[in-house]
Amino acid sequence: MAFKNRSPWIHQLDLDRVAVTLHGDIETDIAIIGAGIAGVSTAFFCLEQTDKKVTLFDGGRLAHGATGHNAGQLTSYFERSLSEIRDEFGDEKTRRAQGDIERTWELLDHMYTSAGLSIPLSRFLGHAGLVDFDRVMRQLGDAHVRAELGLVREEILIAKEASFVKNIPKDYSKYYSLVKQSEILSRLETKDTRFIACLSAQKGCMNSALFCQEIVKFLLLKYPKRFALYEHTHIHKVIVREDHAMLDALTAEVSAHKVVLCTNGFENISLISSNGLDINTKFHHTVRGIIGFMSGYVKKYDKPPIAISYIIGKLTELSGEYFYVTRREFEYDTNHNHNLISVGGPELTIEDTTEYVRERDYPKEAEKEIDTFVHEVFEGKSDVLSQYEFKWHGLMGYTPNGIRVVGEEPKHPVLLYNLGCNGIGILPSIYGGNRIAHIISDKKLLPSIFDPK
């Protein structure tokens, strides 16, 4: 019997909550398409920073997309080398972008405080393990860039036992510390002696789907006349005009002064210009989809929350470049305290994001890869695990350059974007929501690497 897509984050939602579907034509100031972490954050900051009426739409249910099918990690780095980003965008834009994402922790705290949330949010020193000289040099190169740009440097530990230590340029000596390999393995919670270096920085974990649900409850209470959420309302066509847009929801039409796409890509949405100026559809079709596969098992609570990446390189056709582990306290039942250990790494690239089916079966190959990793790297061969309580997959939208797209469509300021998961989307989505609110409220902003091109 195949294992269906079952996410621990969806498991914690209020499944008795009544969803409202749009059945008649409406007008709104800001229409936001996609009720995940990006859409909810954009709604939050637009309502807070403007007096506009905001309407949020989702073709399914609130936070049931990528936001409800991720690893739950909070990280403030890009999945591209900072050196590459500087080469593409220059010093100033790179410095501002990295600093902006790091400061998004403050925006997250602000959202928690404003909404009076009490749901779990953990913050800690997380780690990434490295196994070869090339990846160590890449991290040292990024540390050098951080130093030159005046950014906070991450801690890099290298094992004294590593054979390549003598080959590290002397100019990089101030960016790392030599320690016994046992210290690195201890941080990574592994006995796998392939790991000879470790990168440590602030990380966190939370249930982003539950976060969205609670933020929406707050917004509905605080802004009853200015905010609405419509679920099971698929916007399949957006006609962009000079000063407004028309959204076709099949059984209803929506007129909006601004439209913000907060999706992983452009799946199932037709964008049409009525003024003769082209919308960059070539860019739209270059957003590729990657399906990430994850499994989770529950253990008695015996260790604190953690997020660790194990950068091993591509092992099989299904594996990504690394495996990742998130451990957090999980309210599985009312009688015991549990940890949920979530593990991911296997992934599958699809050229057309419309091909993704959330109800697809969980492949046995992904299950086997994760189980092998858990037994051989994370838990150790001697630890016999119980069955995985959760197995899930989610669609990640990757932009062509791996940088989130946040801002106005160049020829159509009525249309804005806050999109592109790029693998690590929670903090960038929140940052994007705040930036969109700044744009709509006519705040003067400096050019950014996130600007649409």
Image (tube, rainbow, N blue to C red):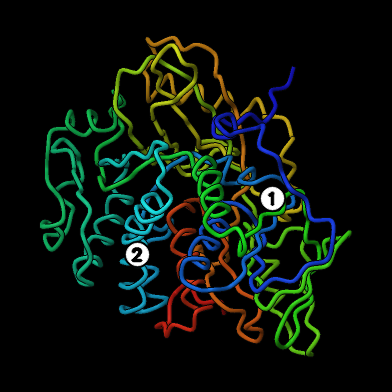
Left or right relative to 315: residue 381: left
Query: Is any atom of residue 381 visible in this view?
Result: yes
- In depth, the one of 396 and 168 nearer the eye is 396
- In depth, the one of 440 and 145 nearer the eye is 440
Query: Is any atom of residue 130 visible in this view?
Result: no
As measured in the structure, the alpha-carbon distance from the residue carrying label 1 to the one carrying label 2 is 26 Å
Where residue 89 appears, as percent x and y from the top left, is 40, 77
Kind of element beneath mark 2: helix
Q: Residue at x 74, y 52 (%)?
A: 59
Circle 1 sits on which residue? 350
First in sequence: mark 1 vs mark 2: 2
Left or right relative to 120: residue 157: left
Left or right relative to 363: residue 85: left
Q: Residue at x 54, y 55 (%)?
A: 219
Where residue 103 appears, as percent x and y from the top left, is 31, 61
**10 Å neighbourhood of mark 2: few (<14), some, or many (≥20)?**
many
Quadrant housing the N terminus = top right
Q: Residue at x 62, y 79 (%)?
A: 409
Give the answer, above or below, for where 260 lies relative to 215. below
Q: In which quarter of the view is residue 313 placed?
A: top left
Q: Residue furthest right?
A: 251
Numbered mark located on residue 82 in the image: 2
- Label 1 amino acid? Ile
Where residue 86 appears, as percent x and y from the top left, is 35, 73
Numbered mark located on residue 430 in the image: none
